[in-house]
Amino acid sequence: MPASRYTDVAIVLHWTIALLIVGQLAGGLYMVRIPDSEAAFKFQIFQLHKSFGVTILLLSLARLVWRFTHKVPPLPEAMPAWERAAARAAHWGFYVLMIATPLLGWAYVSVAPLGVPTFLFGVVPWPHMPFFEGVSDREAVAHLFEEMHEYAAYAFIGLLVLHAGAALKHHFVDRDDVLARMAPFVRRKTSV
Ligand code: HEM
């Protein structure tokens, strides 16, 4: 019989990455509003944002490896085909954003004319991407990545709202075990 819930590794990665991403989105929206008069504080918060962003990137790559090497538990049989397709699209949308959003942020700081170095959590030096040496208009390319990073973050917020809403609908309206598959602390609706 196929497993009725995700493995412990998948569950720990899911909730760790989820917590980091929610914090990263809130922190990102906050930090771009810090006035330039608080330059030293702003610098520290940007460094923290970059540190957590790289952490999310590395954990997301681990999660993707898990996804390609494991079978996910099956969805309830009663679920209509359109809902299955929507769930699958949302999950792969998350993987795309979990990898693309930090890469776009990293690309932005790598090509930005200021060339501010990154030290993960104030200690580990993190290199700039090497692809931008020959770029002549760094300002314009940096602006493009900055905008793409921002739009990816907004897409993240939209997908998170949909995803959490769907999980709650499964639990409270459909009364199935879709949420319990990923949240072992939630009481199951069936005994399987
Ligand atoms: C999943 C990971 C990440 C998320 C969810 C995220 C989210 C955000 C958000 C919401 C903003 C504010 C956008 C705005 O309103 O202008 C932002 C800005 C920024 N992010 Fe990220 N970020 C992530 C990873 C990274 C990484 C890895 C880096 C660099 C190594 C980075 C560098 C930046 C920078 C420099 C800004 C400021 C851009 C500006 O000054 O307008 N981010 N991020």
Image (cartoon, grey):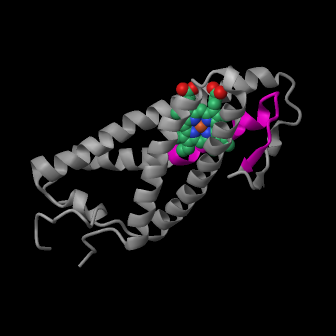
Is 184 placed left or right of 43 in the picture?
Answer: left
Q: Which residues are magenta?
A: 96-119
Determine whether, in the image, residue 11 is placed left or right of residue 34.
Answer: left
Q: What residue is at 24 percent from the left and 57 percent from the top?
A: 179
In the image, residue 138 lies at what x, y percent? Answer: 81, 25
| Outermost residue, bottom side | 1
Residue 35 place in picture, x, y as percent: 63, 21
Is 13 left, or right, of 142 in this rendering?
left
Res 61 quadrant in image: bottom right
Image position of 137 with respect to 172: above or below: above
Vertical comparison of 174 with 47: above or below? below
Could you tell me residue 113's position as x and y percent? 82, 27
Q: Quadrant of ligand 1?
A: top right
Q: Is residue 103 visible?
A: no
User: Is residue 99 highlighted in magenta?
Assistant: yes
Quadrant of the drawing holding the C terminus: bottom left
- The reply to whether residue 35 is visible in this rendering is yes
State whether the magenta stretch is mostly helix, strand or loop.
Answer: helix
